Amino acid sequence: MKTNPVYTIALVTLGCSKNQVDSEFLAGKLKKRGVQASHQFIEGLTDAVIINTCGFILDAKEESIQTILQYLEMKKDGLLSQVFVMGCLTERYSKDVASEIPGIDGIYGVHEQDKIVDDITGRLRDELLGERVLTTPSHYAFLKIAEGCDRTCSFCAIPGIRGKNISRPIEELVAEAENLSGRGVKELILIAQDLTYYGIDLYGKRRLADLLRALEEVKGIEWIRLHYTFPAQFPLDVLDVIRKSEKVCSYLDIPLQHVNSRILKSMRRNIDGEQTRELVKTIREKVPGIAIRTTLITGYPGETGEEFEELKAFVEESRFERLGVFPYSHEEETPAYQLQDDVAEEIKEQRMEALMEIQQQISLENNQSLVGKTLKVIIDREEGDYFVGRSEFDSPEVDNEILVAKNKAIKVGDFYKAKITQADFFDIYAE
């Protein structure tokens, strides 16, 4: 039985940080209309839920469906009055969701936030620039600089879900950054499906470097971090900004996916193995000490043992600071779906584990090389006997954490100098 007299909606967000930002803006719009919106379901206090789904790969789709069913069961038991569903899964499979999962009160795509608000509140659309209810700690936030993607990577369903790339104007992004800074945000994490494509549709050329320079001028912002850059035609002027800037972190998330030229061509990555190796070399030369985060795919259709050995050697020689590996997922409505998914699932998993075993040793050696050094860290939270922080080389939730010995003077959300005292595979200890 609901005990709260105010109409309350909980947003349940699945998938990537781009979905997270969408949910934050939606919560802000609902709040503006007088609806109490939160990012946590509380039994007895929540009237309805909006589930922001992911439909990228099979595991994500299954999680989204199970989450929908879970909340529909709660509605059936009288714990909720309404269940709304939005996001990538419903953009991609709206008719299937409507016909196969009865009981949903509203089904929306990724670009229908205003329709959701109108349907829930029964009022006209109300524009609200920069209004968000953050799900992150108050000292950092994601800044989505573009929507959609113009790339045609063979394994990716995102362009079909989110449409073509649409860049947001620099002035609008600076205004949002100023709004976030005024609310205590000190670190901006720039996200898009492809940051390096920024500006082509709006200005006729790549302008990520110009955007970074504009964001550097925002008072209160101390760190700016780049997520999701694309290797082909990488704008090298961005590296110049990173090297010279005191605010743009020496950190680059650049999913390379593979290094074998045949596979890269089949993946439609518009870059070959030699160019990939040269790009990694150039990044390191232009920004000494940069932390490179990348992701790789194992078991892509037709991947031979020899091609995988080339990928292993690439990981060993490149010594990436951060690495994620994913077994290939055969997704319908992607160009690669026409290929035979001929690498057995157990082989995909074995190859993934082999790469992560190599990376684990690299991570240990990299971490141990920090012992005795002093780094600038931001404190994310307090946990047990430590304050948990990060350096500029680590993004929240996906990278290493620095465990700082407790000190009464330390405050969550502030920056400190910390001396590294000990390191293992993934955690670093400091004081």
Image (tube, rainbow, N blue to C red):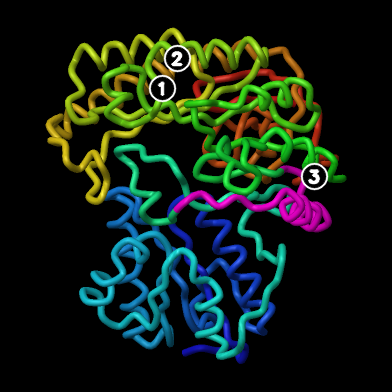
Residue 132, image quadrant: bottom right
Residue sitting nearer the eye, 45 or 384: 45
**74 sits to left or right of 116:** left
Residue placed under numbered mark 3 in the picture: 411
**Callout 3: helix, strand or loop?**
loop
Look at the numbered disc 1 and give the secondary structure of its residue.
loop
Q: Position of residue 80 (x, y in %)?
A: 43, 84
Q: What label does residue 275 carry, if any?
A: 2
Asked if the stretch drawn in magenta spans residue 173, the answer is yes
Q: Is residue 400 left or right of residue 333?
A: right
Marks 1/2 in contact by CB < 8 Å: the verdict is yes
Whether residue 245 sits left or right of residue 421 in the image: it is right
- How far is mark 2 from mark 3, CA to CA? 45 Å
Residue situated furthest front in the rendering: 204
Which of the marked residues, 2 or 3, is nearer the chain's N terminus? Answer: 2
Q: Residues within 10 Å of mark 2 (few under 14, many from 20)?
A: some
Q: Label 1, on which residue?
A: 271
**Residue 79 place in picture, x, y as percent:** 42, 84
Residue 28, compared with residue 359, is above or below; it is below
Q: What's the residue at 50%, 78% (across, down)? A: 116
